[in-house]
Image (spheres, rainbow, N blue to C red):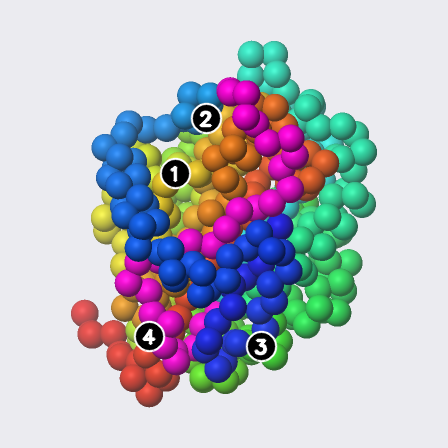
Amino acid sequence: MFTFPLHKSPCTSSIYHMIRKTVPTLKNVRQSSGKYFNSVMDASKENQSSTKVDTIKEEYPKNLTLLPVVDSLGKWIPIPASSTGDNCSFSILSHNVLSDECLRSSQEHDFLIHNGVHLYDHCPAEDRAWPTRKERLLNEWISLNPDILCLQEVEFTAFPELHERLSAAGYEGVLQDDKGRAEAQHMANSIFYKSRIFESQKVSHRSRALIIKLKHVNSDNHIIVANVHLQGDPKADDMRASQLKSTVTHIKKLMGGKRLPYVMTGDFNENMVYTTSKHILKFLNESVLPLTNPHLQQPYKPTFISPWIAQQIDYFYYGTRELRNTFLIEPLQDEEIRRLVHERYLPNHIFASDHLPIGACFEFLKLPDEVEKEPEE
């Protein structure tokens, strides 16, 4: 597993803990960063000239040097030109937990079968059981110790116990409550935040997004966090674009006329790196708020891995005027991805969901009294 890196910021230096020797210290990362940055940028250029990626099985061919066990979620990547000054930092983790209802009822859905292979047939019954997966997920999140935790596919019946366990670890939580949802809807988004680091100011419940305005206790900065789980139908890119537009509109509304920091994260159900959707591209070009995707500058790595497709569909978007992205998680090493893509898939006896979690660290760029007002239109 990974853990969030150590910070020198006085606001958060005491809340991060290194729990595995496989995770490099911030000092070691800095010492080797120059060579790594060059390789990252070269890979980025190659990615930008590639065609749309529907599967990465060809990118990760089988070989004889596969790792025997996948037991680590990789390493932290420092972002070029990042600052390690005195600005206050915070961390966010996003994870689609894989709803138990979705897993149990998946046999009823033909669209989850491809060339005779079902999406979850590879996973033994004991590893599909919610009590087992719940403990693995909770242990993972608590060990990672993020300041903000954004979850998708949280069942209404499972939320109380998750909330109780995470509250004991210092979190407050809110569950999405869309009054217009269908009666058959059994899951929603949730956001947890460290109560000694953030205070909740306002919550907005949308059909595909949970949006919260938080106050950073030590710095008095405000930040708006949007946790999205967009429409999953592969052909519904127009709906996903509409849901994104609605989410960003409500983020701006919560700003109250000021240029507040904001982060949008979650399961986009769209390959945002290589998308050719005219609806998604139109949204990105015409968004009422500037949106930066830090994943575009990193080598392509999947976050959803099944027996017949592996894609990157979980992301962060943020505004660079108010925040600086200092770290991202590289979900897995190449050899570990090969192992998952060709043999293990997700979920399995180690990873409790069909999604890998994504993580990021950000710094506030401005003090509260430096926050600008939006120019009148």
User: Does the rendering let one see residue 300?
Assistant: yes
Specify the amino acid type for callout 1: Tyr
In the picture of the structure, the residue carrying the numbered disc 2 is 60
Place residue 274 in its image quadrant: top left
Residue 374 on the magenta span: no
In the picture of the structure, the residue carrying the numbered disc 1 is 300
Q: Are marks 3 and 2 in contact (CB under 8 Å)?
A: no
Give the residue drawn at x 72%, y 55%: 139
Q: Earlier in the sequence, mark 1 or mark 2?
A: 2
Please give left or right for residue 247 compared with residue 47 in the image. Answer: right
Give the residue drawn at x 78%, y 38%: 129
Could you give the CA–CA distance between mark 4 and mark 2, rounded to whole angstroms?
Answer: 38 Å
Q: Earlier in the sequence, mark 4 or mark 2?
A: 2
Specify the amino acid type for callout 3: Ser
Residue 271: percent from left, percent from top:
39, 37
| Range of residues picked out in magenta | 62-90
Specify the amino acid type for callout 4: Leu
